[in-house]
Image (cartoon, helix red, strand yellow):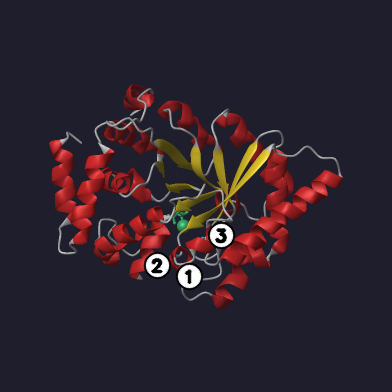
Amino acid sequence: KQAAYAKLRDVEPFTRCGTRIQVMINAGLRDDISALAMTGADGVGLFRTEFQFLVSATLPQRERQTRLYRDVLEAAGDKPVVFRTVDIGGDKAVPYLQSEQSEHDENPAMGWRALRLALERGGLMKVQARSLLEAAAGRELHVMFPMVSEPWEFDAAKEVFEAQIQHMRKQKKHLPDTIRYGAMLEVPALAEVLDLMLPRVDFLSVGTNDLTQFLFAADRANPKLAERYDWLSPSILRFLRRISSSMVGHQVDLGVCGEMGGRRLEAVALLGLGYRRLSITPAAVGPIKELVRRVDLGEITEAMTGWLSDPQTDLRKNLQEWAAERGI
Ligand code: PEP
Ligand code: MG
């Protein structure tokens, strides 16, 4: 595996037609960051901060959080890191919130989790904001909020950061040079109000793991539903296309950070739908960079348009043939 990584590390992911595609990694541990150098990825498109919370018996204190975020930024060097604020609760249960969680959650994935929990537990969000702001002093900070369903949730979460910034300014603390705020698009409802969201955010990252489960009402973890949870179905692909076409005329970076982007045919489909930034599992970076070089964006865009206009089309078969013809 190491040898395969090394061979593909220096592959620059330009498409055949010359467009540079951003290929980033998903991470959650300090040690994951070494994959940046090993794979030559462009940065960390999703750092799941909840890992630290999940392995801890008590709520991680500010010093511990700051140390982790600082270590991660240092390890990443010049490459950007997108920190997602905690997505705990729901199926990612933590002992110190257990009694509160189980009272409410019969459907944990749709329950009291992520931003919903963080906005109510204001102290938790404040400590995380402060830790991130301190850790990124003198650098660029990318913050992303999970499970945003309505614009006000994004505003409220951003406000927690802005209040901390005011506070730190008064204390003459060293702050990040720039802060970029983004949202995960993983609750379908948010896609219906993109016109309200786009003026607010610097970037959007589509979380296809959750988005797919919510769109199909099919639990992402239930093997009995695996066939209903299909990233190559017309419903998902049309939905993703609608999102990317709404971006025209807005200065908002769009990416995908679900597992979908690390899979061969799915990645080809995403390129054909207008996605130019994929954040994926480190093991997939080499193969996806290699694949990008064989894709002509004009060709795949036209092909996807044709296939998606006919819902009877077998997208998997068509993509398979298309890819095989190009040695993908
Ligand atoms: C997603 O939902 O697609 C995602 C990237 O986040 P997670 O897998 O952590 O829910
Ligand atoms: Mg998610």
199 is higher (above) or lower (below) than 36: below
Q: Is mark 1 within 8 Å of ligand 2?
A: no
Report which residue position mark 3 lands on. Answer: 88
Q: Residues within 10 Å of mark 3 (few under 14, many from 20)?
A: many
Which residue type does callout 2 highlight? Phe
Label 3 or label 1, whichever lies nearer to me, is 1
- The front one of 257 and 219 is 257
Q: Which mark is residue 214?
A: 2
Q: Are marks 3 and 1 in contact (CB under 8 Å)?
A: no
Specify the farthest residue to the right.
171
Q: Quadrant of the N terminus?
A: top left
Residue mark closest to the camera, 2 vs 1: 2
| Nearer to me, 222 or 310 | 310
Question: Is the distance from the Cβ of mark 3 to the nearest ligand 1 atom less than 8 Å?
Answer: no
Residue 191: name its quadrant: bottom left
Q: Is residue 197 left or right of residue 208?
A: right
Counting from the top left corner in percent of width and height, residue 205 is at 47, 51
Type of the residue with mark 1: Met
Q: Secondary structure at mark 1?
A: helix
Q: Residue at x 47, y 26 (%)?
A: 37
> Is residue 96 visible from the viewing direction of this image?
no
**Residue 50 position in % (x across, y down):** 57, 52
Label 3 SS = loop
Q: Residue furthest front?
A: 249
Q: Is residue 88 above or below residue 168?
A: below
**Whether label 2 touches label 1, CB < 8 Å:** yes
- Disc 3 to disc 2, C-alpha distance: 18 Å
**19 lies left or right of 196:** left
Secondary element at tag 2: helix
Binning the other alpha carbons within 10 Å of mark 1 as few (below 14), some (14 to 19) or many (20 upward) gives some
